[in-house]
Amino acid sequence: MDLAPTPSRLQQLLTRMEMADRLAAGGYELTTAELAQLVEIPHMELSQHRQPWI
């Protein structure tokens, strides 16, 4: 089965999410402002989100 290459924006998001996961695994916490910047979602939108993302 040939898989299409991962789109660049998706790959960049996955890379940033992996970075957040590594920080969490190391005992570090991100503020909502830092997380919003990391995933490129406006801080207000992220802080008001109450439902699962997937």
Image (spheres, rainbow, N blue to C red):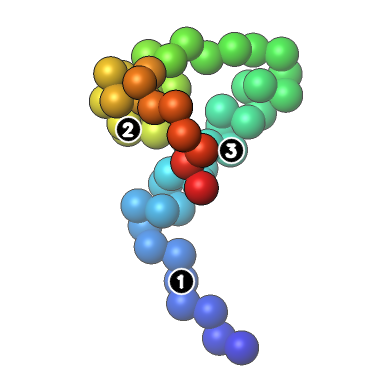
Disc assigned to residue 18: 3
Where residue 43 sits, quadrant-wise, is: top left
For residue 38, say whether it is visible: no
Q: Which residue is mark 2?
A: 40
Q: Earlier in the sequence, mark 2 or mark 3?
A: 3
Distance of label 1 from label 3 (alpha carbons): 19 Å
**Category of crowding for the residue at label 1, using alpha-carbon neighbours closer than 10 angstroms: few (below 14), some (14–19), many (at least 20):** few
Residue 41 in picture, x, y percent from top left: 31, 31
Q: Secondary structure at mark 3?
A: helix
Indicate whether 39 appears above or below 37: below
Where residue 37 sits, quadrant-wise, is: top left
For residue 50, say whether it is visible: yes
Q: Which residue is mark 1?
A: 5
| Residue located at (38% from left, 62% from top) | 7
Callout 3, which amino acid?
Answer: Glu
Callout 1, which amino acid?
Answer: Pro
Name the front one of labels 2 and 1: 2
Distance of label 2 from label 3 (alpha carbons): 14 Å
The reply to whether callout 2 and callout 1 are in contact (CB within 8 Å) is: no
Distance of label 2 from label 1 (alpha carbons): 22 Å
Q: Earlier in the sequence, mark 1 or mark 3?
A: 1
Callout 2, which amino acid?
Answer: Glu
Q: Earlier in the sequence, mark 2 or mark 1?
A: 1
Q: Which sits in the foreground, 46 or 14?
A: 46
| Residue located at (41% from left, 53% from top) | 10
Q: Looking at the figure, which quarter contains the N terminus?
A: bottom right
Q: Secondary structure at mark 1?
A: loop
**Category of crowding for the residue at label 2, using alpha-carbon neighbours closer than 10 angstroms: few (below 14), some (14–19), many (at least 20):** few
